[in-house]
Amino acid sequence: MLNLIVVLPFISALLMALLYLQNTEAKRYWLYTIIGVGTALLITLLSLTLLYNAINGMPTLHTTLFTWIRLGDLDIKLAFMADRLSLVMIGFITFIGSLIHIYAAGYMKDDEAYGKFFSYFNLFMGSMLLLVLGDNPIIMFIGWELVGVCSYLLIGFYHHESANIKAANKAFMLNRVGDFGFIMGISLLFIALEGHGFSFNAIEENISLISTPMLTLIGFLLFVGAMGKSAQIPLYVWLPDAMAGPTPVSALIHAATMVTAGVYMVARFSFVYIQVPDVGLFIASIGAASALLAAIIASYQSDIKKILAYSTMSQLGYMFIAVGLGAYSSGIFHVLTHAFFKALLFMGAGAVIIAMHHEQNIFKMGNLKKRLKLVYITMFIATLAISGIPPFAGFFSKDAILVTAFASQHYIIWGVASLTAGLTAFYMFRLLFIVFHGEAKSQKTLQYLPRSMTYPLVVLAFGSTFAGFLGLGEGYGNSQLINTFLQLPDLHHHLSHATEYMLGAMSVFFALFGMTLAYIMFAHKTQEPQADSFVKRVIIKKFYVDEVYETLFIKPLLLLSHFIAKVLDPKLFDGIIQLSIFIYIGLSIRFRKLQNAKVHFYALYFLLGLSFMSLYLLYKLGVTL
Amino acid sequence: MPEFNLELIIFSILTLFMLGGAFTMISAKQTLYSAFGFLVSMLALAGEFALLNSKFLAIAQVMVSVGAIVVLSLLTILTINTKVENLPKEPYKYLWIAFSLLIVSPFTLLLYKVLTTLPAHFAQAQTITTKLVGKTLFSGWVLPFEIVSILLLVAMLGAIIIAKEKLKGENS
Amino acid sequence: MTPNLFFLLASLLFSIGLVGVVSRRNLFVVYMSIELMLSSVNLVFATLSRLLGDAGGSTMAILLIAVIAAEAALFLAIIIHLYRQSKTLDSDLFSDLKERT
């Protein structure tokens, strides 16, 4: 059954691809929908069944499809391992994934390349499941690469606009830079564990064979991969641009699933990271910095999807703070809750965009709360969740992370995280208020939203509300359901209940403060932020990071490519070949003159040959004059 | 130092003629001059044969080589009576000759060295008589003799056929 | 008057004949140079005959003269034929086998 979960999406993707290629014009809406959404629902069912079994005490599942490479010591099987971590992951991936599939059936209804879209979508699902269910790092890496490819394909889905293609390229290239680190990490791991097998279990058993400096390096390199995949500093600049893809893509890939692959990877390699807490601290710091940076930039953005993109980056930073400081379960818990409310936010944003006839600038919207009631309510719930206001989901997961930071005495990280929590509430409520409150900037009649787009919002709203109760911290009843279930090697810190309550109250206070500030500033009159002061300009221009990358990396590379292609290649390499051709032809012309059919000359050639032979003989015979 | 006697003087004179004739032959512009050089050279060669006590050979040389071959050549040359301006233009003739002389010198040296590995004095004097030669020719050497006569016949026929003018109405 | 002198003379004659063949374009001169080469070989035979006291050398020399005569006939016939055909005595002009550029 485990095999089916991974293989089915690939098969359905292939099927839809073949159907689509067979006739790209035919609008087989229902056929593609049934295959696409049906597959998603089917694997959701299978995953939830397995999860249910695991809750009831089923041990870790191992299945093998086939042996992929066997060269002496190197034995890599296409095998899947479903331990609790993987099962939790595939549980929400497939569940939220199916909801987004249903949503996409409505969103992409009028698109010409509908079949292609669902083919890519299912391909992505398969790849993500491959990543999560892989038995060894190689299989995980295959899934890792594949989700990158799907991201590229889906971001550039509206390929007639060249800006979208550029965004897709950017995403893929930055991913690639991260992947380079990842590959190095895996290779080092492999070399260090020569001959002891390479599945995750085998690595875990033999981890003591690797020296600590080597483990530090490996941990760092693996995290470089996560930096690229999960959009942390410095490899994050692709995420805002990736919003060029259709909104379901943003919801699924860049909110709920692909970007959390990095966090999953750290949790999966937890047996490595607990040995090297310094790398963990580095990860947490990067996470904190990314969270803060993203929050600041989001506060000044005008495009609804870009705000949500930066918010994703910010929340990912939180997850990395958690896994960096050893609280792997809390990190995964935040992944889970974040998937719910972020998917909801993106889907709601998509609904708003469709309703407003593809308008994405929030300052051109306003006062939609009466006209889009369902969307408003669900998005309001999601915003409450993301701001960390109890009893919604975000509070518990975020609180767990903040408590970890404080308890492990990394107060700077805790401070940054708390500040960012306040900022999160601020910019999210800013979004909500500008879009749904205030004065209406446009009086257009709204596009009708199909039910396939609105019903999933409701389901996710329920999730955002109640998912938090899976991980109540110590002070709140200590159910810690998810932590005990996952059985990850968390570092435990003990805090008194009083401290815990105080920390919780502080975070709620920050959130409420942000919300109120947003209300004051944006609930009534709104206008787009102008680049008046220097500070404002820098923030609106996203701290000029893109421009810096352009000058530091892209321009020199382009110059080098241009140089090689236009100068080096034709002149040097072609030049050498041309030169040898030239010499050859020249020699040939000269030699050809020797064969002029004149007996005279041929006699001379005889004589020359004779002469040389005589000389040689004279030399050999030692004859002198 | 070889004995300085009459033989040597005659030898030297004959050599001079021979080499002079040879040089004229290869470097003269007009064909007839070359032919005369050739003539002189052949006559001197006959004299050399005589010096070697091969009387019959000397006579044969005069009769055949000079009397037939050179005469035939002269006849041909005079029949084909090309004017001086129709002769092949040979620019750099002397350059070619000089260059070839240079190139051929190792070969000459080799040839000389090979030939002089033989004993360096004449065996006996006057043992080769005409009578002896005749006897040898018709006893031990009769097969080559016959073959050469066939050769001559064939050559004659061949020469006639090659040099024949096409008659009217005949295919090539 | 040692044999060596004769051999030297023969070598020189041969070389001069060779030079004549290589250097000149006039067909007659080529022909006569070839004759010269053959005659030099004749001289070697004669010398060897005297040197070794063997009559075979002289016999061979006589036969060689006959061969020379035969060859002369043929050669001259060819020259006449060629002259009739193309009205020239220049060996360089008979170059039909050269490559066409």
Image (cartoon, coloured by chain):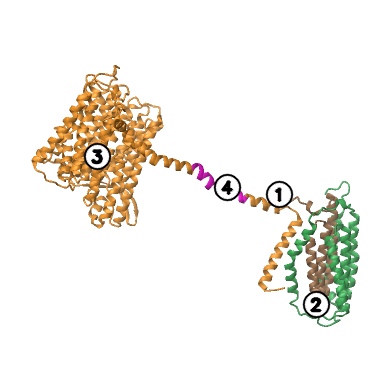
Disc number placed over residue A578 in the picture, else none: 4
The amino acid beneath tag 4 is Gln
Residue on which disc 2 sits: C3
Query: In 3D space, how far apart are the residues under numbered discs 4 and 2 (Cα atoms)?
Result: 62 Å
Residue on which disc 3 sits: A317
Q: Which chain is brown?
A: C
Q: As drawn, is B11 to the left or to the right of A413?
A: right
Instruction: Identify the residue at horizontal 24%, vertical 25% (top origin).
Output: A454
Kindly state the secondary structure of the residue where label 3 is placed: helix
Circles 4 and 2 in contact, beta carbons < 8 Å: no
Q: Earlier in the sequence, mark 4 or mark 3?
A: 3
Q: Is residue A425 above or below residue A58?
A: above
Quadrant in which the N terminus of chain B appears? bottom right
Indicate which label's residue lies in the foreground, 1 or 2. 2
Q: Which chain is green?
A: B
Q: Please check whether the numbered discs 4 and 3 fall on a single chain.
A: yes
Magenta residues?
A: A565-584
Disc number placed over residue C99 in the picture, else none: 1
Indicate which label's residue lies in the foreground, 4 or 2. 4
The image shows residue A590 at horizontal and vertical percentages of 67, 52
The image shows residue A314 at horizontal and vertical percentages of 25, 36
Query: In 3D space, how far apart are the residues under numbered discs 4 and 1 (Cα atoms)?
Result: 26 Å
